[in-house]
Amino acid sequence: SQQGEEDPQALSIQEGENATMNCSYKTSINNLQWYRQNSGRGLVHLILIRSNEREKHSGRLRVTLDTSKKSSSLLITASRAADTASYFCATDAGYQKVTFGTGTKLQVIP
Amino acid sequence: GAVVSQHPSRVICKSGTSVKIECRSLDFQATTMFWYRQFPKQSLMLMATSNEGSKATYEQGVEKDKFLINHASLTLSTLTVTSAHPEDSSFYICSARGAGQDQPQHFGDGTRLSIL
């Protein structure tokens, strides 16, 4: 079963705008990861945030983690057409496996 | 960054054929490899987790005799879909992770399997 639920399921924005995606999960975690998937391709790891971290930045990406609410958000600033993809959160609760959320399909309109 | 190569990228074959998919970590040692299945417009469904030199751990509902996984070395894992049928048609993706805590998974580009 899916550990993570992402919101929204789909998001369409204009190039240059910011995109925010949210992820909620159910159990305690060691870390939470965000991945991007272009259509018909494998996933690309974007950023990992540990359970004792609250915020992390990487380029135009900003991830927050609220373990009390069991939620995370991914913010993409100044979006580009090339950011069009599906974005997944994944939770690592130990036990060697990572469970993926349902994904947010982002479309950035040039 | 870490690179995972998955081959073939696409397979079209007749019902009853067995299909082998390879997953290689090219520049790091993958102590753990994962095999996923993804249906159209859906998330990844974990099929099994394999550690080098030991038997794979299959998720509930995944037939281990149908989906044979071998992880013979720290850089190679294979998934064999035995006697494939049309309902096995799907997108199969592997990933690999190195040793240590808080390691991300590195994904192959997936294999599109179509059984006629």
Image: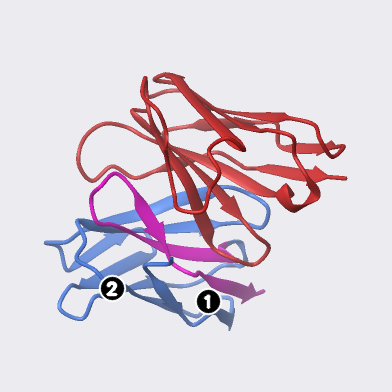
Chain colours: A blue, B red
Q: Chain of mark 2?
A: A
- Dividing the picture into quarters, in which one does residue A29 lie? bottom left
The reply to whether discs 1 and 2 touch (Cβ–Cβ < 8 Å) is: no
Q: Earlier in the sequence, mark 1 or mark 2?
A: 1
Instruction: Give percent across and percent down for residue B102.
Output: 23, 46
Q: Which residues are magenta?
A: A83-110
- In the picture provided, is B107 more to the left or to the right than B10? left
Q: Residue sitting at 38 percent across and 73 percent down?
A: A75
Q: Residue at x 74, y 53 (%)?
A: B87
Which of the labelled discs sits on residue A16, or is there none?
A: 1
Eye-nearest disc, 1 or 2: 2
Identified at 36% across, 24% down, the residue is B54
Q: Position of residue A91 (x, y in %)?
A: 32, 60
Query: Magenta stretch containing residue A85, yes or no?
Result: yes
> Can you see residue A14?
yes
Query: Which quadrant of the view contains residue B110?
Result: top right
Task: Tell me which residue sits at (66%, 49%) in the image.
Answer: B91
Q: Amino acid at mark 1?
A: Gly
Mark 1, secondary structure of its residue: loop
Instruction: Locate the N terminus of chain A and report the quarter of the image it occupies.
Output: bottom left
Q: Position of residue B89 (x, y in %)?
A: 74, 49
Q: Which SS type dominates the magenta stretch?
A: strand
For residue B95: magenta? no
Residue linked to disc 2: A26
Which of B63 and B113 lies nearest the eye of the viewer?
B63
